[in-house]
Image: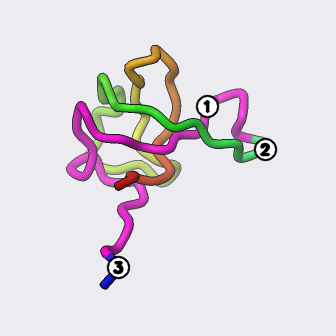
Amino acid sequence: MLLPTMDGRNRNDIHAGLKVSIVLKEDQRTGRRTEGVVQDILTNSPSHPHGIKVRLESGQVGRVQEVLP
């Protein structure tokens, strides 16, 4: 059975150490995704329609599109 994938719009689903796929600001037009591990959560609100903004351990900042297994 496949588990439902979390899409990254709810802050409660995101935490440090989680592997995610994000879209960087400069890639928003193309939708190109970058994978990495969450270091910090930058969005304060409980949800965001475009995805919760995070900083990856690599230092890149973007909005979570998908939580990876």
Q: Which residue is mark 2?
A: 30
Give the magenta part as a residue range. Answer: 3-28
Q: How is the image coloured?
A: rainbow
* First in sequence: mark 3 vs mark 1: 3
Residue 45, compared with residue 50, is above or below; it is: above
- Dot 2 or dot 1: first in sequence order is 1
Note whether 59 is above or below 64 in the view shown: above
Mark 2 residue element: loop
Q: Are marks 2 and 3 in contact (CB under 8 Å)?
A: no
The residue type indicated by label 3 comes to Leu
> Percent position (x, y) of residue 62?
52, 31
Instruction: Tell me where residue 7 appears, x and y as whole percent.
Output: 42, 59
Which label's residue is closer to the chain start, 2 or 3? 3
Q: Confirm whether the magenta stretch covers residue 50.
A: no
Task: Name which residue type carries label 2.
Answer: Thr
Q: Is residue 60 toward the left or the right of residue 3 in the image?
A: right
Where's residue 38, x and y in %? Answer: 34, 31
Which residue in the protein does label 3 denote? 2
What is the secondary structure assignment of the residue under circle 3? Answer: loop
Disc 1 element: strand
Which residue bears the numbered disc 1?
24
At horizontal 50% and vertical 24% (from top left) the residue drawn is 61
- Residue at the outermost bottom position: 1
